[in-house]
Image (spheres, rainbow, N blue to C red):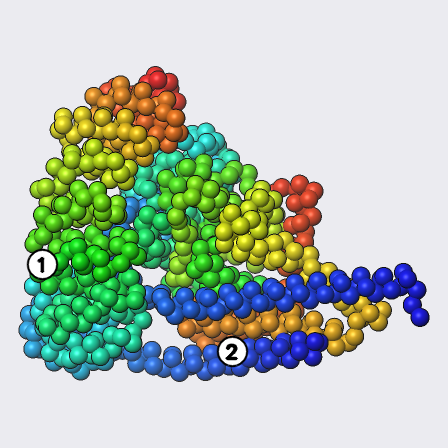
Amino acid sequence: MNNLLLIAAGASLCLAVAMWIALVIARGLRHASSRRRRERYPSAGIAIAEFCGDGDVDALAAKLGKLAPDDVVEVAGRALPFLAEVNRRAVGAALERCGIGRHIRRRFDKANEHRRILYCELLAVIGGADATAVLGKATGNAQPAVRLAAAIALADHGRRLPLRELLERLGREARRSSRLVLLFAKLLPHQEDEIGALVLDRDAEDRLRLSALHALEMEDAPSHREFLFALEEESSPALAAAAARGLTSQTDTRAGDTLIRLLAHPAPEVRREAAVAIGRARLLAGRQALVAVTGDASPMVAGAAARSLWLLERERAPRPVSQADELDAAA
Amino acid sequence: MTSLPQYLLIEAAEAVTLVIFVSAGLQNLLHMIQLVIAAAAIRARPPIAEADLLHGRYGRIAPPISVVAPAFNEERTILATVRSMLSLRYPDYDIIIVNDGSTDGTMSLLAAEFQLGRVVEPMELVIPHAPVRAVYRSRSDPRLYVIDKVNGGKADAQNAGISLSRANHFCIVDGDTVLEPDALIRAVQPFLDDPDRTIAVGGTLRIANGNSAENGQVRRVRLSDRFLPRIQVVEYLRSFLMGRLAWSRINSLLIISGAFGLFRRDVVMEIGGYTTGSLGEDLDIVVRLHRHMIEEKRDYRIGFVPDPACWTEVPQSLRVLGRQRTRWQQGALECYFQHKSMAMNPAYGRVGILGFGHMILVDLLGPVLEVLGYFCIPLFWWFGVLSIEALIAYTALVFGLGTFTSIASLMLAEFQLRPYPRVEDLLKLGSAAVLENFGYRQLHNFWRLRGWFYYLTARHSWGEMPRIGFASS
C-alpha cells in the first residue's frame, strides 16, 4: 500500500515537472508565432476599413486572399456587426471570392463552439446555396448556441422561414436564450403576423412569447403597443409583467388605466412591475392605488410601491426633505 | 508481548493515521476530478479572446446593470477603481459607490474628482441597511452615483447599493478592484444564454500586485517581484480556473467572490440581500440563494465565467495574509454551521451532497486533519507505530499531488488565458507552485486552524488590509 502511494506521488511529481517544462517550451514557441500573427493580424482589419472607404470588392478580396484564413475570419467577425448593411454584403462577397467561404465549410464540423458561432455569422453575409446548406445542417447541431446562431444567420438572408418548425428544431435549450430576440427581429420584416401570433399563443413557452414581444419592441413594430394591452388579461406572470414594463413608455390614459388595473394582478411580480412602472411614468392618477399597495403582503411589491409613491409625491410637490418624511406623508 | 494499553494506543494511532491518509487522498482525488471537469468545460467553451465579437453578438440584447462597490477607507485605490468602472465597455450601466462611513479621505476624493452633487434619489426600502446620509451624482459623468452612509459593514453597504439600483442585474465589486473593460459583457453571457434560470454568475479574479495601471486600466501585466503575491497567483488560478469552474458545471458553486459577481436583483431581494455582520458574506449569499431556490422548487443556475473579470490587490505581508485567511476560514465555518441542515441532505441535491461534502472535507476537516498529520505521522514513526515507508508515502502524497494540481491548473490557465506574457513569469509561477508546498502550505493550514479557534471563541473581526494602490505606468 505504501509503495503504491509512493509510486503515485512520485509519478505525479514527475508529471508535474514534465508538464512545467513542456509549458515553458510551448510558451517560447507560441511567443514567436504570436509575434508573426500580431504583425499579420491588423492587415485584415486595415483592408476592411479601407474597403468601407472605396468599396472595391475585388481589391478587398485580393488583399484578404494574401492573409491567413483564420486571421481573416477573426477580424471579419469582429468588424461585421459594426458595418452598414451594404458594406456587410460586399465584404461577404469578397470573403467568398478569396476562399473564406470554402475554408469555413471545410472547417465547420471540427471547430469549437465559439468558432462555429463565428462561422455562422460569416456565412450569413457570404450567402449562397452552399452557405445555406451548411447553416441548414447547423440548425441541428449538438450545441444549442450553434443551432441558434445558424437560425439567426439563415434569417439574416432575409427570407421567410417555417417559424414553428424552426423553433421546434432549435430545441428547448436554444429556445431559452435571449438571442432568440435577434432571430425574431431578423424575421420580423417578413413574418410579423406569425411573430405576433406567437406573443398571444398561451400554449407556447413564456420565453418564446417574451422574446417575440421584445423583438417587436426592439424593431419598433406598430403592433407592439396593441400586444401590450392585449397582455393585460394574461395569466402568465412573466408576460403580464413584461406588458407592465412595456407600458411605462406609453403615456396615454389607456396605458395608465391598464397599469393601475395591473396593480390588482394575482401575481406579485406583476403587481411589482406595475408599481415600478407607475412611478417611472410619473402617473399621478395611480397615487391612490399605490397607497393601497404599500400594505401588500409581498415586501417586494410594498417596497416598489413606496418608492414609486415617493417619486409621485415629489412630482406633485417637489421639496428637499428626507425620504422617510416623504414616505410618512404619503402613507 | 504488548500490554492492553499499548495495544490500544497502537490501534488508535493506526486509526488516526488511516483517517489522515484517507482525508489527504480524498482531497487530492477531488482536485483531480475538478481538474478534469474544468478542462472539459474550457475545451467545450473556451473564453473568447476578442471582446469585440461579444459586443457585436450580445450588445443589442444586453440587460442594464448597476455596478455596486462598497468602499471603506479606500482612499489609495478608490479613484483607480471608479475610473476603471467608468471605462467599462457595456451598452447600459450605472455605478453606485457606497461610502460606508469611511474615516479617511475616500468621500472627499470622490467628491472632488468626479464633481459630485447632492441629489434626491428614492431607495427601495426592502432590504434593511444603516441610515443613508446623502446620495450624490457626478456632474462630470451622470452614470456615477455615490451613497454616503453610516458605517454598517461591507454587507450593509452592499445592501444600500442594491436598494438604490434600478436595473434588474447588479454587479458587486470591491472598492479596491480594477475591472477589465469588457468584464460585464463577458460575465453577462450566462444570463443571456439562459435568462430565466441564471440567477448569479462569478468571474475570475486576477492579482494586481506588480502591474501598473493608467486611467483605471491595467496597462502592463507583470508578476509581482515578491514571493507571497506569486504564491497567491497560483492559489487564485487553482481556485478560480479549476475549482469554481468545475463546481459551476455541476451547478454546485457555493461561492462567488465579493470582488466580482453578477446577480439578479429580484432574487437577491427575495432572500433579503446580504447578511450583515457576516465574515463570509460572499459565501453566505450564494448558499442562501441555493437554499431559497431549492426550497421553492425553482429551476435555477449559478454560473461562472473563466474569462478574467477584474484585478485585485492581495496581501504582501504574512501578518495581513494570515489575518485574511483566518477570516475566510471563520466565514466558511459561520456559513456551514448556519446552513448545516443542508449538509449531506439529499433534499438539497448536488449542493447538499457535493457542495457541502466538499466544504466538510476541505474547509472544515481539511486544516484540522492536515495539521494533525504534520505532528502525528512523524510522532508515530518516532515511536515505531508507523514504518519509514508510510512516513515517506504520506509526505509524498501531500506534496506530490499538491504540486501536480497546481502545475496542471497553471497549464489550464496558460492554454486558455495566457495570464502573464513573459516566459520568465511562467518560470517564476512554476517555482512558486512547487515551493508553496514547503512552508507556505503549513502556515496556511495553521491560519485556518486559527480561524477554527476564533470561530469557537467567537472572536469576530475584519482587520485591516493596508493598500499600496496601483503603480502608474
At x 49%, y 68%, the residue is B35
Image side of residue A161 versus residue B128, left or right: left
Image side of residue B146 versus residue B431, left or right: left
At x 60%, y 64%, the residue is B27
Image side of residue A182 versus residue A35, left or right: left
Element assignment for label 1: loop
Residue linked to disc 1: A160
Q: Which of the two labelled residues, at mark 1 and mark 2, occupies the earlier sequence position?
A: 2
Quarter of the figure with the C terminus of chain B? bottom left
The chain letter for the residue carrying disc 1 is: A
Residue linked to disc 2: A20
**Residue A293 x, y percent position in the rendering:** 32, 23
**Residue A182 x, y percent position in the rendering:** 19, 54
- Quarter of the figure with residue A264: top left
Tell me if residue B110 can be seen: no
Measure the alpha-carbon separation of dots 1 and 2: 55 Å
The chain letter for the residue carrying disc 2 is: A
Single out the residue that lies furthest toward the front: A203
Image side of residue A20 versus residue A308, left or right: right
Residue type (three-letter) at the residue carrying disc 1: Arg
